[in-house]
Amino acid sequence: MVARSSEVRPSAVRHSASPGAGGRRRRGAGRLAGLGLGGAALLVVLTGCDVGKTFGGFGWPQGGITPESHRMYDLWIASCIAALAVGVFVWGLIFWCVIRYRKRGNELPVQTRYNLPMEFLYTIAPILVVSVLFYYTAVVQTDVNKESKNPDVTVEVVAFKWNWQFNYRDGQGRDANTVASVLGTSEVIPVLVLPSGRSIRFEEQSRDVIHSFWVPELLFKRDVMPGSIRNTFEVSSIDTEGAFVGRCAELCGSYHAFMNFELRVVSPEKYEQFLAAKKGGSSTQDALKAIGVAEYATTTKPFDTRRNTANFNPSDAGS
């Protein structure tokens, strides 16, 4: 005689609908409706204003003054929005799975494998996102690094411990001639005068160590290398006139923090007057005065380096 087993296979169990199932469905529908309304409201907010300004540029400096800086800013904002969209989607799926498929009593969840549509989505979607970001990054990078054959203005940027010299050149490359120059000192901040609406090439050279030429409003900086390396970059135009502080962005020694300069953007007419005055032998301050602008830097000032005998002879400090 064979004894019958009292074991019941899970597949044979038929669950009747619980009284609270309808309530749970209604609550789930309410949550989905709330999420939908919240998403719609967020969409209205984002499309009705400048996303970058709303969220503080997502950490990227604002106030670019060149077409290249605007392109870099737009790329950064678009990348952040794409990252946030992917993050919201992924975290939404995680929370939805946690809530929807949480354990209820002793009931075992249905075990599924090899969901090809989902696997296809998880494989193709990241590839598409990365490909789109790579494409637009390459386009912007190409635009930013583009150089014309004959820019309107060429400036040789010479860096040294711990100041700057700006040479206005009559051409490009090492063989070009310097027609005017601005030299910074410990007492006077160098003022680099440039015209608005003109293409400008910067050719960089260091006399000692690695420095870095940086104007925050350009949203771009490039290292100034010693030796035979001569880094260059170009801006197609500067859209905003005014005074902008410039700095060395590469730690270069004891007085690195004091290595500032000022970029002064003026109209093309005033720029030509300034350059003519410099070619005629005027000092930088006299040339600035001749075009009716501040003679000295207004965005930064010389720092007291306290370079005296006590700095180099500690034993004499108390004498």
Image (cartoon, rainbow, N blue to C red):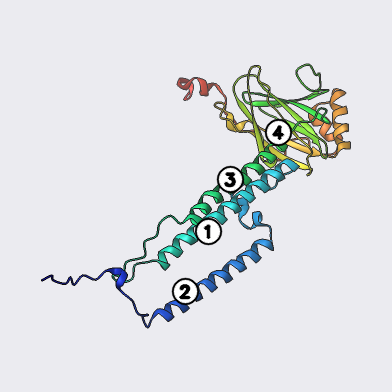
Disc 3 marks which residue? 130
Query: Residue 132's mark?
Result: none
Q: CA distance from mark 3 to mark 1?
A: 16 Å
Residue 256 sits above or below residue 237 on the image = above
Q: Do callouts 3 and 4 mark residues in contact (Cβ within 8 Å)? A: no
Q: What residue is shown at x 74% (from left), y 33% (from top)?
A: 146
**Amino acid type of the residue that numbered disc 1 sits on in the rendered structure:** Phe
Within 10 Å of disc 1 (Cα), the crowding (few <14, some 14-19, many 20+) is: few
Residue 112 sits above or below residue 207 on the image = below
Within 10 Å of disc 2 (Cα), the crowding (few <14, some 14-19, many 20+) is: some
Of the two numbered discs 4 and 2 in the rendering, the one whose residue sits closer to the viewer: 2
Within 10 Å of disc 4 (Cα), the crowding (few <14, some 14-19, many 20+) is: few
Q: What residue is shown at x 50% (from left), y 75% (from top)?
A: 29
Which numbered disc flags the more N-terminal residue, 4 or 1?
A: 1
Which numbered disc flags the more N-terminal residue, 4 or 2?
A: 2
The secondary element bearing badge 2 is classed as: helix
Q: Nearer the viewer, residue 49 or 310?
A: 49
Disc 4 marks which residue? 145
Q: Nearer the viewer, residue 28 or 141?
A: 28
The secondary element bearing badge 3 is classed as: helix
Within 10 Å of disc 3 (Cα), the crowding (few <14, some 14-19, many 20+) is: few
Query: Residue 89's mark?
Result: 1
